[in-house]
Amino acid sequence: MNKRYIFTFSPDIVNRPIVSEIAKHYDVMVNILNADVTSGREGKLVVELEGADGNIVQSLEYAKEAGVECVPLEKQLQFDQDQCVACGSCTAVCFSGALMMDADSWELLFDPEKCVVCGRCVKACPLQLFRIAMEE
Amino acid sequence: MAVKKSYDEINEKIRKGQAVVVTAEEVSQMALECDPGEIARKVDVVTTATFGPMCSSGAFINFGHYDPPIRMEEVLLNDVPAYAGLAAVDAYIGATAESKYNETYGGAHVIEELIEGKEIRLKAKARGTDCYPTKEVETIVNKELVNEFFLFNPRNAYQNYAAAVNSLGHTIYTYMGSLLPRFGNATYSTSGELSPLLNDPDFRTVGIGTRIFLGGAQGFVSWYGTQFNTSKQKNIYGVPTSNAGTLSVIGDAKQMHTRYIKAAYMERYGVTLFVGIGIPIPVLDEELARSVSIRNEHIETTVLDYGRSEKPIVGTATYAMLRSGTIEINGKKVKTAPVSSLLRAREIAGELKQWIQGGQFEITKPIEHFPTHTHVKGLKRQ
């Protein structure tokens, strides 16, 4: 199965190869979807973990013990759906399938599970209804 | 016998609550089973609608006279400049005018907030004259405090609009949305078979004085729109295959609703205004029955490369194709997305249908028809 997380690294562990360790020791494929890491500062990675459920759980425990904060991704993109006029501009830039127009009703469908938090919808929405909340 | 109905006959039915009113999508479905003659007999009025970003929009406001009077020369509404080269407390706030301090806030937002009943800060300056001695006023206005507040949009409701792609190696940000590099996506902005001027392509019933749905209230077609172009190529179904006719519309903004007038900011393009317009097309005869029966697969539009300044044509697509989610450009499958809301356009067509069925809204014979041979000029340095 696939699960997406935001990993937050404190400055003291930014230099440790934790992602490689997860991949090597727990047989979990790590796809880095977004990265903001600088030596000496707090770092953030948006990752998709692919592997057996048990292995993913263990790898997350390992990361947490190492000092990485692991937050499931679905909490991270905020969408003010009540204000949406369903113009569809955001679907022009969404390639993960998270934002789609319903082919019959032409309502905007939003599936947070599919979102990779690329941020393109944030700029594309003419009503500025999307926000990426990196801090929970 | 050929069907002929007059505006008066249809209005008589509307007043009695007997008019048969359907939306342009509903009549297109009917047309799969009925011929134009049957449709002309059965249907009296077809409602059409669109809800999309229409930059060439704005509003006139009269603020009322101050004591001692001022002839306003510079007007700011929440720091957005309005045109005040008029007498003396009239101004025109254009939708795309930007705040002096925030490029994501503009005239469209001022208009939406006024409609919503919010207060707006007015700053006015003048040089001072004998009859208008005051040089500066700063105060709060809202739609109850001002005299008139009416939308007057010089170019709305484009009859068809070209779809947009980008051939460049980087994303470009346009009024057609974010266009991804190397034909990464295509955007389009017409409600297709529901779109007003595609259902009356020769402007037989839409003309000067036509009563319409504008922003949730009754409004009127005031004139043909700017860049009104009857010279564009038409396909075998009689509809132009790119931007052609336009409308200039007017209506009392105090009666409008922010559900149908919505300010927007397009990344790195600027501020614009979503405008909701609904237009009734009376089915006077078989020819109009045929026009309103048009379907998305019959309406083509050109696809333009917005990556190059001359915007060359790189393909054509029907609205059926554009709505399917992908079109093909130079052999490549390109993802499509709308920038105008079909959902809300349908809501407007439904609302207008109810108004007519309820006898609250009668159809109007144009006072004057639009010109029939127009083309659009460019601008050259002389």
Image: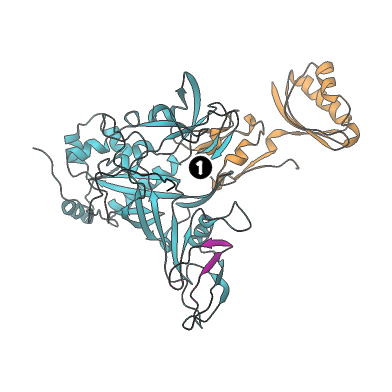
Q: Quadrant of the N terminus of chain B?
A: top left
Question: Which secondary structure is most common in the magenta stretch?
Answer: loop
Question: Mark 1: which amino acid?
Answer: Tyr
Numbered range of the magenta stretch: B70-89
* Quarter occupied by residue B178: top right
The residue wearing badge 1 is B175
Q: Is residue A94 left or right of residue A31?
A: left
Q: Which chain is orange?
A: A
Query: Percent position (x, y) of residue B196?
Result: 33, 44
* Residue nearer the viewer, B131 or B43: B131
Q: Which chain is cyan?
A: B
Q: Pointer 1 indicates a residue of which chain?
A: B
Quick one: SS at disc 1? loop
Query: Percent position (x, y) of residue B28?
Result: 29, 34
Reply above or below: B132 against B9.
Answer: below
Q: Is residue A93 left or right of residue B381?
A: right
Query: Percent position (x, y) of residue B99?
Result: 59, 58
